[in-house]
Amino acid sequence: MTKPKHRIYTMKFSSVYPLYVQKAESKDRTKEQVDEIIRWLTGYSQEELEHQIELENDFETFFGQAPQLNPNVSLIKGVVCGVRVEEIEDPLMQKVRYLDKLIDELARGKIFENILRG
């Protein structure tokens, strides 16, 4: 019997995206910075990112269709939701948590250039 998918995989990226923006804006950061982080992580262009949001794809599809994960993702370290991102074994969950970690760093006021490792 196969293990059921984690619910985050089937959540629409478009439903979580505004929460990322809201979290950033509540700390005097911008939607543009959120978009830049997502583009850095996934390789999407701005147009492709906007298209993904319009399509209302789930996280599994969003990351599955991403052009190229940034080669510097291994530099993302730390804890999200009580778990060290660098120790997550499930590749999709790790990508989701990488994004969560980057948005957290943005909202905490980390220097933007340092968020985009490398």
Image: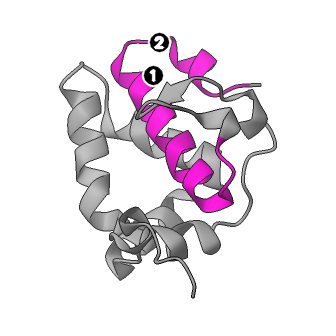
* Number of numbered discs visible in the structure rendering: 2
Relative image position of residue 50 (x, y in whole percent)? 41, 66
Is residue 44 visible in the rendered image? The answer is no
- Locate the C terminus by quadrant: top right
Amino acid at dot 2: Lys
Q: Residue at x 57, y 84 (%)?
A: 2
Give the x, y percent position of residue 46.
50, 57
Kindly indicate the quadrant of the structure image that contains residue 16. bottom left
Q: Is residue 85 above or below residue 19?
A: above
The kind of residue tagged 1 is: Glu
Helix, strand or loop under label 1: helix
Which of 12 and 39 lies nearest the eye of the viewer?
A: 12
Closer to the camera in the image, 90 or 114: 90
- Report the residue marked by disc 2: 110
Q: Which residue is drawn at 29% across and 30% down?
A: 24
Q: Residue 18 carries which label?
A: none
Residue 56 picture location, percent across and down: 34, 77
Looking at the rendering, the stretch of residues picked out in magenta corresponds to 88-117
Query: In the rendered structure, does residue 91 fall within the stretch colored magenta?
Result: yes
Marked residue nearer the N-terminal end (1 or 2): 1
- Cα distance between the residues tagged 1 and 2: 5 Å
Query: With 37 as the anchor, is 73 left or right in this view?
Result: right
Compare residues 97 and 15 and report the one nearer the observer: 97
Is residue 5 a member of the stretch shown in magenta? no
Q: Where is residue 74 shown, x and y percent of the image?
A: 77, 35
Please name the residue shown 69% across and 51% down the image. 89
Which of these two is toward me, 112 or 4?
4
Residue receiving disc 1: 105
- Crowding at label 1, few (<14), some or many (≥20) Cα neighbours within 10 Å? some
Q: Is residue 107 above or below residue 3?
A: above
